[in-house]
């Protein structure tokens, strides 16, 4: 079984299947990112993605690509912060540790016990299961350790390379009506451009805003899909009018290669490997930083209890996810389907009852 | 670097400009090292450092000098190291006077030539020439005491006042480097063009060298000073140079009238009579080079064709050449991987100069601005140039890129790595090797029937390289020639293994002595790629490092005087008593069988006379130089001078600027008046230029690529919120930036990453300017004004690098005027400031009586000293200098140059010599400068040209050209040559 942190329910419902490969993923350690953007460039080069934007300064520090989208599958955010924000981040990070939650906030609305029929989500794994790396759940013992953060700066410049999360419960995959999106043998989520009809349902299905259609916003039939709206680019643009996102370099993985972004990253801020190892490394690193007093460090995506069941791409952040443009509590859209179905069912029954009553009423009148 | 316990990055934005090398900083940090970034700006390097120390550009010597002062006075130096491995114990001439005595000048100043006679800087010696020493370090003439006095006024308060660094930050820095130095720990410094691009950049590096020697951080793992080179194989193009004054392996270019015979020349390189380091074998290196180039035509009888080598008669650096172009003194110009229209200082001067050429060849990937200035450059827009008036014929030759050609890259750490060709170049694009091979073939074919003796050097060249399957020169054949081989005898043609095999009798040939061994045994050592998992951390089987595959230079210093490692933690090479040889993880950089206790009474005689505790084997005396008796033209000890155009008075001396800086008094190269002069308030802010990760230098390799252009699409300036408020700049709006040379426009990034500094009671605002954009060019995704247009040309006297890091200017909101109005706009500011070619260009600002005192001190204290052995050697330096003057009159070469520098451990050469990076090319090609001397001033050629920067051939206060000092001096180079030819003909007739 590829993903030991998943239970059978997940496998059944998250488009998981038996493979000979371990689940692959990234660990992006933003604390050593130097914002060189080599990942963005290597990604576009390898995947032949068109350039983004209109060659004008964006007004977001050194960030001029803005966000993940159809063409930019790795995106480096630049965030300038003053002392107050640094202290707040340090405090919020410390709380996470003291709560024994080095990951993002725990889900409180998780239901346990038998799942409703047709429900999309598995039961919550018990906390006594070895979900996290050794010691990571234990509040760090600060006694005897100098936790004075070294040289609290008056200012810092955060850099973080974002990427598709390759969720355990992938919203895009769940809602895709054509089956263009599939889960690979590496347990990553990939679009098949030749199957995608460009309907765009997945765009709304992604809680992170990652996947996007490559076009100018209008729908065109496959017979009329050319690259005209990218006049700046002379090269043929592949996969126009279909949904596009990071494939975790599926074409490289099948050859036993490392994804282009991780391969090119000069400081090993982007690490690639078995997801299990990535999560373990991430926990080790966050514990290490906390021991040095850098309590602002926290993980994102490493918690299998979050709204998407944890992500294949795990991040070490130095502030709240919102600061980096990441949703603090991402929830896969289909998560609420059971409840919605139930509610809808009740509503429907109610409507029927009301209708019946109205008929009864009319008879009476 | 990964082994460092503390890394100070100063004068470099390493993470942005050397991201790949920065992995070792990341690694060191992961192992627990403390990273400190000293820089005017908070950059991407700072973002991952432990500490940012903002500094006023150009004040680095004050900071480093204050660290030296505290290290000395608080006894924080590594005493045993200092005593044994440096020249701290040497006694200096009694006639030496320090800037502390002369208000900023050193003894030996000659106002007539604006140069130093360094005879008073020399060691005291006994009659036999053996240097006198004071092992107690208490003699007032000892280097140690002189050093102490010299830096006594460089204090923490001075640092606060002059650099804008708080006392607590200073203490933090001091504590960091001193607690991380010594037996158990090492500190590393890293710098780049933030140190070199100043009018005293080489001295910045010298200051760091002194500090690192005092702390015992040279020649040891995790120590040294990393000279970060600006782009791929800039190091290589210094080793096998594109510099006018060097031949491969840091051999000097011979000078006309000075090195008339091979013996004269070899004396300047180094002989056993003058050296005990490896430069003593200079004759073998030079002979082998000549044999490699001219083969059978180089014989013992004709001094190995020494006369085939061209001679230089002055400085022929980029900026001097520009000026000569402006004077119609240059016909043609090759631009190879260089875009001076955007990348060189004072861009307008560069473009105007090119308009005087008869022909111009641009080899590049695309039509860069330097290829199209004649139709769409900024001067076409302003009307200063009209296309129909320009006679320059421009040829564009497409160039192969690095994936389309094989060859080597030599990086910062002297590691030479082979690069295989991945694909053939498209269309007619060619590699440099192919281009020059073809060009040579055609020229030789044209000259084949010539019997003119001046064509012999070309016709006799060994131009017979084997071709590969594509019909191109096999680059490995060139590597084999560079490596060297035996000539004649039973080993004829076999590769040499190490440079000590080179001979001076013509039985060996080799294109670059320091690269010998790279093709040892006929194996391309540079192509070795044994994975790190299969070897130790030194990774001696990954590629090949010059010299002799040593990874850390001067690594003898990693062991104590007895030959034992200083500590287990920092051990690298050591003396194995049983084997009676030096052993260790790295290749020992020392005579391998020389016992640590060995001692020679002879101060010269080649490597065999090295003492067992002389780790600095390329220095004539085997010691690391705290005090540089020779090698630096502008003083034996680094002294703080304010940058050209500084708005701050020198807090230490009446002498405001470096008196020896190379200036160009020209109407098209005006300077701001400088602190205290009326008009300086017109240009109140400081521009400092830099690069971004997303772009490559002048943009030739990045603005034509959409993936890179989109990441930084527009020229911008970085300003602090305080300055933005003062000037009225809007976030991401437009600003116009005006310097005494030009005005440009840029988008505005207001950021707290820029910090105003309180200097001498007033706020100094620095404005950051990346310099990647240009106007014109064909097909670039993005364009914009070039920051380098703002720069003036004022140069470091040692290596001729322009000052790009401190430029006076002003800023205002909105976009700049267009067309001819732009010229008026710039001139309006010039008039307001009252600028003339004299402004800011006063060289000496101390009272005349001080100059007299400085000039009076000459003659060395003791006879029998170095002077009579030939100055250089006195102190030995490398060759690399010396045009003009006989050896007794000048001394060493830039110790900030090449292998001679005591500046590194893991790192090499380069130091001051190597302007890497910005502005592209210019500095690179400039570096490794020469010294002036009485006969030929290094800053101008003997061409009587009043405009190429000689302080005595300039403009007077009215702007009229000075009359040349020597009325016999011909008006220009052509006249000079004509006269010389006429004289030669006359002599012939008389005979």
Image: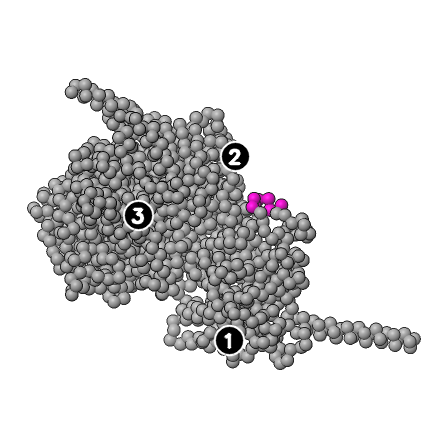
Q: Which type of secondary structure does the marked residue at label 1 adopt?
A: loop
Residue receiving disc 2: B818
Locate residue B463, reporting x and y percent.
30, 37
* Of marks 2 and 3, the one in the foreground: 3
Residue sitting at x 26%, y 61%: B585
Q: CA distance from mark 1 to mark 3?
A: 52 Å
Q: Which type of secondary structure does the marked residue at label 3 adopt?
A: loop
Chain-order first, disc 2 or disc 3: 2
The residue closer to the viewer here, A248 or B372, is: A248
Residue receiving disc 1: A131
The residue closer to the viewer here, B100 or B403, is: B403
Task: Sort mark 2 into few (<14), some (14-19) or many (20+) by Cα contacts within 10 Å.
Answer: few
Tell whether label 3 touches label 2 (CB within 8 Å): no
Q: Which type of secondary structure does the marked residue at label 2 adopt?
A: loop
**Considering the image in quadrants, where does the N terminus of chain B appear?**
bottom left
The residue closer to the viewer here, B906 or B848, is: B906
Residue B846 showing in the rendered view: no
Work out whether disc 1 and disc 2 sit on a shared chain: no
Residue receiving disc 3: B910
- What's the chain of the residue with tag 3? B
Residue sitting at x 20%, y 52%: B617
Work out whether disc 1 and disc 3 sit on a shared chain: no
Locate residue A319, reporting x and y percent.
50, 64
The residue closer to the viewer here, A69 or B480, is: B480
Check the image and report above or below for B503 versus B148.
above
Locate residue B593, reporting x and y percent.
16, 58
**Magenta span of residues:** A228-235
Q: CA distance from mark 1 to mark 2?
A: 65 Å
- What's the chain of the residue with tag 2? B
Task: Sort mark 1 into few (<14), some (14-19) or many (20+) by Cα contacts within 10 Å.
Answer: many
Q: Is residue A229 magenta?
A: yes
């Amino acid at each position: 079984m590829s993903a030991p942190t998943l239970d059978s329910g997940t496998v059944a419902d998250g488009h998981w299947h038996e493979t000979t490969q371990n689940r692959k993923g990234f660990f992006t350690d933003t604390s050593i990112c130097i914002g060189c953007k080599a990942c963005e460039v290597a990604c576009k080069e390898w995947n032949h993605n068109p350039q983004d934007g209109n060659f004008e300064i964006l007004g977001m520090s050194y960030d001029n690509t803005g966000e993940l989208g159809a063409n930019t599958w790795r995106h480096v955010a630049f965030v300038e912060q003053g002392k107050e924000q640094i202290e707040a981040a340090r405090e919020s990070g410390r709380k996470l540790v003291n709560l024994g939650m080095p990951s993002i906030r725990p889900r409180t609305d998780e239901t346990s016990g038998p799942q409703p029929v047709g429900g999309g989500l598995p039961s919550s794994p018990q906390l006594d299961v070895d979900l996290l790396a050794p010691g990571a759940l234990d509040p760090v013992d600060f006694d005897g350790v100098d936790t004075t953060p070294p040289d609290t700066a008056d200012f810092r410049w955060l850099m973080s390379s974002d990427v598709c999360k390759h969720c355990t419960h992938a919203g895009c995959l769940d809602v895709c009506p054509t089956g263009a999106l599939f889960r690979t043998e590496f347990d990553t989520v990939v679009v098949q451009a030749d199957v995608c009809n460009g309907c765009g349902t997945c765009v709304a299905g992604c809680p992170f805003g990652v996947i996007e259609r490559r076009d100018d916003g209008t729908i065109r039939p496959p017979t009329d899909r050319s690259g005209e709206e990218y006049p700046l680019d002379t090269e043929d643009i592949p996969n126009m009018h279909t949904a596009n996102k990071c494939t975790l370099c599926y074409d490289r993985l099948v050859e036993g290669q490392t994804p282009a972004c991780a391969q090119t990253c000069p400081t090993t801020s982007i690490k690639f490997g078995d997801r299990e190892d990535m999560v373990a490394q991430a926990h080790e690193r966050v514990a290490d930083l906390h021991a040095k007093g850098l309590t602002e460090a926290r993980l994102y995506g490493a918690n299998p209890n979050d709204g998407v069941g944890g992500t294949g791409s795990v991040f070490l952040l130095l502030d709240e996810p919102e600061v980096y443009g990441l949703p603090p509590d991402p929830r896969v859209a289909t998560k609420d389907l059971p409840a919605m179905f139930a509610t809808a069912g009740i509503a429907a029954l109610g409507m029927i009852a009301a209708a019946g009553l109205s008929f009864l009423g009319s008879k009476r009148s | 670097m990964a082994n460092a316990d503390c890394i100070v990055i100063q004068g470099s934005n390493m993470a942005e400009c050397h991201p790949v090398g920065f992995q070792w900083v990341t690694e060191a940090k992961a192992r627990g090292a403390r990273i400190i970034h000293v820089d005017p700006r908070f950059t991407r390097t700072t973002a991952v450092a432990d500490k940012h120390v903002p500094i006023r550009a150009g004040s680095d010597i004050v900071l480093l000098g204050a660290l030296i002062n505290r290290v000395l006075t608080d006894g924080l130096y590594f005493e045993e190291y200092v005593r044994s491995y440096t020249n701290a114990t040497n006694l200096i001439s009694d006639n030496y006077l320090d800037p502390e005595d002369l208000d900023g000048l050193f003894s030996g100043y000659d106002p007539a030539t604006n140069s130093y006679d360094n005879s008073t800087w020399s060691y005291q010696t006994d009659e036999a020439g053996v240097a006198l020493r004071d092992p107690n370090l208490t003699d007032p003439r000892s280097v140690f005491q002189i050093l102490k006095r010299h830096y006594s006024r460089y204090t923490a308060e001075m640092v606060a006042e002059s650099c804008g660094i708080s006392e607590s930050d200073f203490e933090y820095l001091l504590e960091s480097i001193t607690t991380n130095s010594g037996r158990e720990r090492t500190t590393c410094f890293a710098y780049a063009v933030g140190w070199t691009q100043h009018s005293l950049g080489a001295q910045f590096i010298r200051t760091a060298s002194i500090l690192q020697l005092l702390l015992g951080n040279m020649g040891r793992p995790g120590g040294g000073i990393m000279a970060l080179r600006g782009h791929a194989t800039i190091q290589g193009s210094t080793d096998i140079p594109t510099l006018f004054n060097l031949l491969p392996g840091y051999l000097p270019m011979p000078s006309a009238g000075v090195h008339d015979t091979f013996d004269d020349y070899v004396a300047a390189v180094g002989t056993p009579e003058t050296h005990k380091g490896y430069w003593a074998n200079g004759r073998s290196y030079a002979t082998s080079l000549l044999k490699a180039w001219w083969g059978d035509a180089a014989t013992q009888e004709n001094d190995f064709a020494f006369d085939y080598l061209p001679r230089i008669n002055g400085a022929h650096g980029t900026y001097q050449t520009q000026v000569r172009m402006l004077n119609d003194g240059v016909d043609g110009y090759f631009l190879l991987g260089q875009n001076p229209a955007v990348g060189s200082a004072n861009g307008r001067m560069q473009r105007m100069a090119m308009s005087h050429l008869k022909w111009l060849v641009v080899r590049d990937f695309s039509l860069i601005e330097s290829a199209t200035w004649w139709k769409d450059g900024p001067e076409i827009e302003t009307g200063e140039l009209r296309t129909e008036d320009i006679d320059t014929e421009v040829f564009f030759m497409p160039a192969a890129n690095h994936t389309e050609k094989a060859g080597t890259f030599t990086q910062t750490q002297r590691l030479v790595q082979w690069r295989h060709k991945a694909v053939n170049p498209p269309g007619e694009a060619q590699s440099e090797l192919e281009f020059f091979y073809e060009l040579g073939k055609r020229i030789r074919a044209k000259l084949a029937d010539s019997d003119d003796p001046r064509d012999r050097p070309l016709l006799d060249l060994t131009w017979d390289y084997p071709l590969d399957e594509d019909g191109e020169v096999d680059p490995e054949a060139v590597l084999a020639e560079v490596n060297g081989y035996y000539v004649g005898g039973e080993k004829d043609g076999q590769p040499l293994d190490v440079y000590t095999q080179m001979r001076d009798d013509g039985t060996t040939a080799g294109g670059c002595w320091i690269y010998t061994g790279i093709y040892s045994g006929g194996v391309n050592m540079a192509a070795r790629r044994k994975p790190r998992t299969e070897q130790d951390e030194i990774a001696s089987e990954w590629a090949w490092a010059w010299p002799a595959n040593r990874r850390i230079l001067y690594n003898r210093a990693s062991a104590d005087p007895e030959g034992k490692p200083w500590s287990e933690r920092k051990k690298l090479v050591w003396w194995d008593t049983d084997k009676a040889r030096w052993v260790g993880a790295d290749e020992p950089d020392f005579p391998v069988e020389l016992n640590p206790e060995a001692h020679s009474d002879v101060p010269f005689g080649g490597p065999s006379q090295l003492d067992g505790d002389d780790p600095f084997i390329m220095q004539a005396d085997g010691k690391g130089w705290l005090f540089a008796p020779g090698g630096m033209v502008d003083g034996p000890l680094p002294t703080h001078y304010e940058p050209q155009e500084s708005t701050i008075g020198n807090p230490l001396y009446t002498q405001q600027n470096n008196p020896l800086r190379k200036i160009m008094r020209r109407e098209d190269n005006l300077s701001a008046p400088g602190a205290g002069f009326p008009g300086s308030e017109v240009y109140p802010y400081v521009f400092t230029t830099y690069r971004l990760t997303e772009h490559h230098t002048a943009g030739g390799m990045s603005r034509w690529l959409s993936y890179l252009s989109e990441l930084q699409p527009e020229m911008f300036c970085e300003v602090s919120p305080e300055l933005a408020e003062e000037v009225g700049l809007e976030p991401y709006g437009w600003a116009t930036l005006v310097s005494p040379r030009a005005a440009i426009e840029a988008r505005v990034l207001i950021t707290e990453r820029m910090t105003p500094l309180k200097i001498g009671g007033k706020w100094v605002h620095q404005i950051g300017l990346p310099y990647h954009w240009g106007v014109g060019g064909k097909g670039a995704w993005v364009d914009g004004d070039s920051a380098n247009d703002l720069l003036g040309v004022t140069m470091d006297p040692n290596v001729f690098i322009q000052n790009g890091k401190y430029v006076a200017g002003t800023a205002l909101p909105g976009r700049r005027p267009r067309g001819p109005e732009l010229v008026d706009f710039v001139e309006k500011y010039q008039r307001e400031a009252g600028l003339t070619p004299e402004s800011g260009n006063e060289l000496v600002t101390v009272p005349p009586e001080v100059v007299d005192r400085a000039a009076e001190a000459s003659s060395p204290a003791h006879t029998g000293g170095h002077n009579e052995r030939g100055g250089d050697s006195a102190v030995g330096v490398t060759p690399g200098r010396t045009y003009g003057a006989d050896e007794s009159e000048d001394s060493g070469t830039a110790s900030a140059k090449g292998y001679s520098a005591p500046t590194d451990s893991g790192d090499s050469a380069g130091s001051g010599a190597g302007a890497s990076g910005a502005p592209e090319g210019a500095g690179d090609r400039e570096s490794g400068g020469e010294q002036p001397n009485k006969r030929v001033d290094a800053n101008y050629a003997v061409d009587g040209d009043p405009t190429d920067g000689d302080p005595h051939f300039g403009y007077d206060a009215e702007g009229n050209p000075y009359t040349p000092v020597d009325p016999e001096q011909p008006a220009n180079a052509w006249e000079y040559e004509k006269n010389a030819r006429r004289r030669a003909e006359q002599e012939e007739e008389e005979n």
